[in-house]
Image: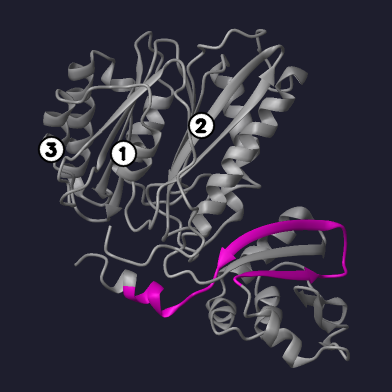
Amino acid sequence: MTDMTISPFAPAQFPTLPPLAGFEMATAEAGVKYKGRTDLWVLRGQPGTQIAGVFTKNKCPGAPVDWSRKALKQKTEDSRLVIVNSGTANVFAGQKGKDAVVETAHGAGYAFGVDPNAIQIASTGVIGVALDANKLVVKFYDMELIADGWEAAARAIMTTDTHPKGATSTAEIGDTTVTINGIAKGSGMIAPDMATMLAYVATDAKLPQNVLQDLLAAEVGPTFNSITVDSDTSTSDTLLLLASGAAEHVDIADSNDAALADFRRALHDVLFDLSQQIVKDGEGISKFVTIKIGGAMTDASAHRIGMSVANSPLVKTAIAGEDANWGRIVMAVGKAGEPADRDTLSIWIGPHVLAEGGQPAASYKEEDGATYMKQDEIVIRIDLGLGDGAATVYTCDLTHNYIDINADYRS
């Protein structure tokens, strides 16, 4: 992580994530790239731990993603390991990168006494630099796994993040209280497609893998897949949900079981919180933007239009410059490739209607828009006037600091 100003939206402190029965973890300084900070995290779930996951749809994924997709399907009676390093993404690193994943898995398997083929591995950082697996493997033997280490874990997986990200919630399954903890990293190269940069969510609930997968897939859409910082989908996007099974509650065999209602709520809360923290730590951010789309032909159409507006460099730079430039919003709506009609389109910024009926709103005053745009949090509302489709997406502005961070990223 380079020296940079902490995001203006950073929380005052990392939340208290309690220890979770069935899980233990540790961090270490492996020296992959960074000096004087941790860059390796190991999470171990007790035997019987179930894992669900979603990964990037980028067509040039990293070797860790290829490995982890296969590991997700591996049946094992051993403890389950998750290994994450920061400093290099180990992507587009040829055979050396592939070999590094195998060496990491087998080294961890030997050190921790688990099936290497069932280990989840993730790397984050510079693309095009192979991981030196030996730097990780030699650390495995010195790592003392403990039950309480979520904040240290969140710090170890950071790259250009300006602060660690964590969230927690509790839920009732039958008469039993279960806990859900989550951490994530992400600041740039954020435009998830079925996952986000790196996010790890764990619970002590006892849920089978198919139920976990259904629950996770259902909640990705309105959370991680509704955020964007810069329109770039990472080659390493990974989101995992692990359940240790340590809690004693009614048996669950179907994701539609009514007993899961509160768990669904809590899982959504954790995923939504983490996804919001990622956008609010967007590289160079000065403003957080909520874009609400209504009146579209379908929800899917509304979502695509919202992401078109959220990803527009012209819209994002106008927001950075505190310019209520509704013309750029109209452009971004029209380029989305979705049904739209300029003569039924209405646009608001905060409480102010900027445009309606294909022209500027007669009641709009530039000074009202200019005053509103000085706020740290901006809401843009768009009504296409065509149907009942709706969606909400989240983004940030595009500032000179974004360019500075990414121009110097490899140096």
> Where is mark 1, residue-wise?
64
> Where is mark 2, residue-wise?
181
Q: Quadrant of the N terminus?
A: bottom left
Residue name at image x 45 percent, y 62 percent = 232
Residue name at image x 75 percent, y 86 percent = 368
User: Does 41 appear above or below 260?
Assistant: below
Cα–Cα gap, marks 2 and 1: 23 Å
Residue type at tag 1: Pro
- Whole-percent x and y of residue 201? 49, 33
- Whole-percent x and y of residue 196? 48, 48
Q: Which region shows up in magenta?
A: 376-404
User: Does 130 appear above or below 253?
Assistant: below
Q: Residues within 10 Å of mark 3 (few under 14, many from 20)?
A: some
**Secondary structure beneath label 3:** helix
Q: Which mark is residue 135?
A: 3
Q: Nearer the viewer, residue 183 or 117?
A: 183
Q: Quadrant of the C terminus?
A: bottom left
User: Residue 140: within the magenta?
Assistant: no
Residue 238 appears in the picture as rendered? no
